[in-house]
Image: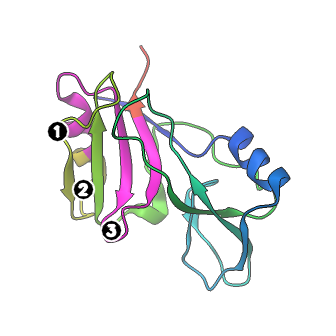
Amino acid sequence: MTFTIVALPPSALDEVRAAGTAERWVAEGGELLRCCLRGARPDERLLLFTYEPPLPPSPYREVGPVFAHAEPCGGRPDGPDYPADWYGRPQVLRAYDSRGWIHPASRQHDGSDPVGALRAVLAEPGVVLVHSRNVVYGCYMFAAVPAAG
Protein backbone atom coordinates (compact mmCIF):
# COMPACT_ATOMS: atom_id res chain seq x y z
CA MET A 1 0.00 0.00 0.00
CA THR A 2 1.50 3.31 -1.06
CA PHE A 3 0.23 6.59 0.27
CA THR A 4 0.47 10.35 -0.06
CA ILE A 5 1.12 12.59 2.96
CA VAL A 6 -0.77 15.88 2.78
CA ALA A 7 0.24 18.98 4.79
CA LEU A 8 -2.04 21.95 5.40
CA PRO A 9 -2.88 23.49 2.04
CA PRO A 10 -1.24 26.85 1.31
CA SER A 11 -4.68 28.35 0.57
CA ALA A 12 -5.85 27.57 4.13
CA LEU A 13 -2.70 29.16 5.53
CA ASP A 14 -3.16 32.23 3.32
CA GLU A 15 -6.69 32.65 4.73
CA VAL A 16 -5.45 32.42 8.33
CA ARG A 17 -2.65 34.90 7.69
CA ALA A 18 -5.00 37.34 5.94
CA ALA A 19 -7.65 37.12 8.67
CA GLY A 20 -5.16 38.18 11.35
CA THR A 21 -6.98 36.18 14.02
CA ALA A 22 -4.23 33.68 14.86
CA GLU A 23 -2.12 33.94 17.98
CA ARG A 24 1.45 35.08 17.30
CA TRP A 25 4.09 32.80 18.81
CA VAL A 26 7.87 32.75 19.01
CA ALA A 27 9.07 29.17 18.80
CA GLU A 28 10.81 27.59 21.73
CA GLY A 29 11.90 24.86 19.32
CA GLY A 30 10.22 21.60 18.46
CA GLU A 31 6.69 22.86 17.87
CA LEU A 32 5.37 20.70 15.05
CA LEU A 33 4.59 22.85 12.02
CA ARG A 34 1.68 21.73 9.86
CA CYS A 35 2.77 23.89 6.90
CA CYS A 36 6.08 22.16 6.17
CA LEU A 37 5.80 19.14 8.50
CA ARG A 38 8.91 19.72 10.56
CA GLY A 39 9.78 20.84 14.06
CA ALA A 40 10.20 24.59 14.57
CA ARG A 41 13.62 26.00 15.33
CA PRO A 42 14.04 28.29 18.34
CA ASP A 43 12.96 31.89 17.70
CA GLU A 44 11.06 31.18 14.47
CA ARG A 45 7.90 33.26 14.17
CA LEU A 46 4.80 31.09 14.25
CA LEU A 47 1.04 31.26 14.25
CA LEU A 48 -1.16 29.19 16.55
CA PHE A 49 -4.71 28.86 15.23
CA THR A 50 -7.69 26.53 15.01
CA TYR A 51 -8.02 24.26 12.02
CA GLU A 52 -10.78 21.95 10.85
CA PRO A 53 -9.40 19.24 8.56
CA PRO A 54 -11.69 18.65 5.60
CA LEU A 55 -14.14 15.79 5.98
CA PRO A 56 -17.55 15.17 4.48
CA PRO A 57 -20.33 16.42 6.76
CA SER A 58 -20.33 13.95 9.64
CA PRO A 59 -20.43 13.88 13.43
CA TYR A 60 -16.65 13.29 13.44
CA ARG A 61 -15.55 16.72 12.17
CA GLU A 62 -13.24 18.40 14.67
CA VAL A 63 -11.56 21.76 15.15
CA GLY A 64 -8.28 22.00 17.03
CA PRO A 65 -5.09 24.01 17.48
CA VAL A 66 -2.16 23.83 15.03
CA PHE A 67 1.13 25.65 14.51
CA ALA A 68 2.40 27.05 11.20
CA HIS A 69 5.00 29.59 10.12
CA ALA A 70 3.86 33.19 10.44
CA GLU A 71 5.15 33.90 6.94
CA PRO A 72 4.89 31.60 3.91
CA CYS A 73 7.65 29.01 4.03
CA GLY A 74 7.09 27.21 0.76
CA GLY A 75 5.28 24.41 2.54
CA ARG A 76 5.89 20.79 1.78
CA PRO A 77 4.81 19.13 -1.43
CA ASP A 78 2.35 16.28 -1.01
CA GLY A 79 4.14 12.99 -1.43
CA PRO A 80 5.01 9.57 -0.07
CA ASP A 81 7.76 10.60 2.35
CA TYR A 82 6.84 10.32 6.02
CA PRO A 83 7.84 13.58 7.80
CA ALA A 84 11.33 13.11 9.22
CA ASP A 85 10.56 15.02 12.44
CA TRP A 86 7.63 12.68 13.17
CA TYR A 87 9.75 9.50 13.30
CA GLY A 88 9.92 8.16 16.85
CA ARG A 89 6.78 10.04 17.90
CA PRO A 90 3.79 7.97 18.91
CA GLN A 91 0.71 9.05 16.98
CA VAL A 92 -2.93 8.15 16.69
CA LEU A 93 -3.84 7.14 13.15
CA ARG A 94 -7.51 8.01 12.86
CA ALA A 95 -8.99 6.26 9.83
CA TYR A 96 -12.10 7.50 8.02
CA ASP A 97 -14.48 5.96 5.52
CA SER A 98 -16.01 7.71 2.51
CA ARG A 99 -18.82 9.14 4.70
CA GLY A 100 -16.31 10.89 6.97
CA TRP A 101 -17.04 8.47 9.80
CA ILE A 102 -14.26 7.04 11.96
CA HIS A 103 -13.29 3.59 10.71
CA PRO A 104 -12.45 0.76 13.16
CA ALA A 105 -8.97 0.45 11.60
CA SER A 106 -7.95 3.50 13.67
CA ARG A 107 -5.05 2.80 16.03
CA GLN A 108 -2.10 4.21 17.91
CA HIS A 109 1.48 3.44 16.98
CA ASP A 110 4.58 3.84 19.12
CA GLY A 111 6.65 5.74 16.54
CA SER A 112 9.04 2.89 15.79
CA ASP A 113 7.51 1.99 12.38
CA PRO A 114 5.10 4.77 11.45
CA VAL A 115 5.25 3.95 7.74
CA GLY A 116 4.28 0.33 8.37
CA ALA A 117 1.49 1.39 10.72
CA LEU A 118 0.14 3.90 8.20
CA ARG A 119 0.28 1.36 5.36
CA ALA A 120 -1.60 -1.18 7.49
CA VAL A 121 -4.39 1.26 8.33
CA LEU A 122 -4.76 2.48 4.74
CA ALA A 123 -4.86 -1.13 3.49
CA GLU A 124 -8.01 -1.89 5.50
CA PRO A 125 -11.15 -2.16 3.33
CA GLY A 126 -13.19 1.03 3.38
CA VAL A 127 -10.44 3.37 4.62
CA VAL A 128 -10.13 6.40 2.33
CA LEU A 129 -8.32 8.87 4.61
CA VAL A 130 -6.17 8.87 7.74
CA HIS A 131 -5.45 11.77 10.07
CA SER A 132 -2.28 11.55 12.12
CA ARG A 133 -2.95 13.08 15.53
CA ASN A 134 -1.02 13.83 18.69
CA VAL A 135 -1.49 11.11 21.30
CA VAL A 136 -1.87 13.40 24.31
CA TYR A 137 -3.66 16.45 22.92
CA GLY A 138 -5.41 14.96 19.90
CA CYS A 139 -4.16 17.77 17.65
CA TYR A 140 -4.27 17.21 13.91
CA MET A 141 -0.83 16.69 12.38
CA PHE A 142 -1.33 15.74 8.72
CA ALA A 143 -3.48 13.63 6.43
CA ALA A 144 -2.58 10.52 4.46
CA VAL A 145 -4.50 9.07 1.52
CA PRO A 146 -3.93 6.03 -0.66
CA ALA A 147 -1.68 6.95 -3.58
CA ALA A 148 -3.40 7.39 -6.90
CA GLY A 149 -2.70 4.76 -9.50
Residue 88's label in the rendered image is 3
Mark 3 in CB contact with mark 2 (< 8 angstroms): no
Q: Which residue is mark 2?
A: 113
Rendered residue at 21%/57% (across/down): 108
Left/right placement of residue 143 relative to residue 18 reads left
Residue 43 is drawn in which quadrant? bottom right
Element marked by disc 3: loop
For this view, does 135 lie left or right of residue 26?
left
From the top left corner, tell me how far across and down residue 136 is, in percent. 32, 71
Looking at the image, which residue is at 22% across and 38% down?
121
Amino acid on which disc 2 is placed: Asp
| Residue toward you, 137 or 69 | 137
Crowdedness near tag 2: few (<14), some (14–19) or many (≥20) residues, C-alpha within 10 Å: few
* Label 1 Cα neighbours within 10 Å, binned few <14 / some 14-19 / many ≥20: some
Residue 133 falls within the magenta-colored stretch? yes
What amino acid type is highlighted by mark number 3?
A: Gly
Q: Secondary structure at mark 2?
A: loop
Q: Residue 5 lies in magenta, yes or no?
A: no
Q: Earlier in the sequence, mark 1 or mark 2?
A: 1
Q: Quadrant of residue 41?
A: bottom right
CA separation in Å, label 3 and label 1:
21 Å
Residue tagged by mark 1? 105
Quarter occupied by residue 47: bottom right
Q: Amino acid at mark 1?
A: Ala
Residue ranking furthest to the front:
59
18 to the left or right of 97:
right
Magenta-highlighted residues:
118-144
93 or 146: nearer the eye?
93
Q: List x then y, in percent, for residue 97.
A: 28, 27
Residue plotted at (72% across, 49% down):
13
Callout 3 touching callout 1 (CB < 8 Å) = no
x then y, percent, for residue 114: 29, 53
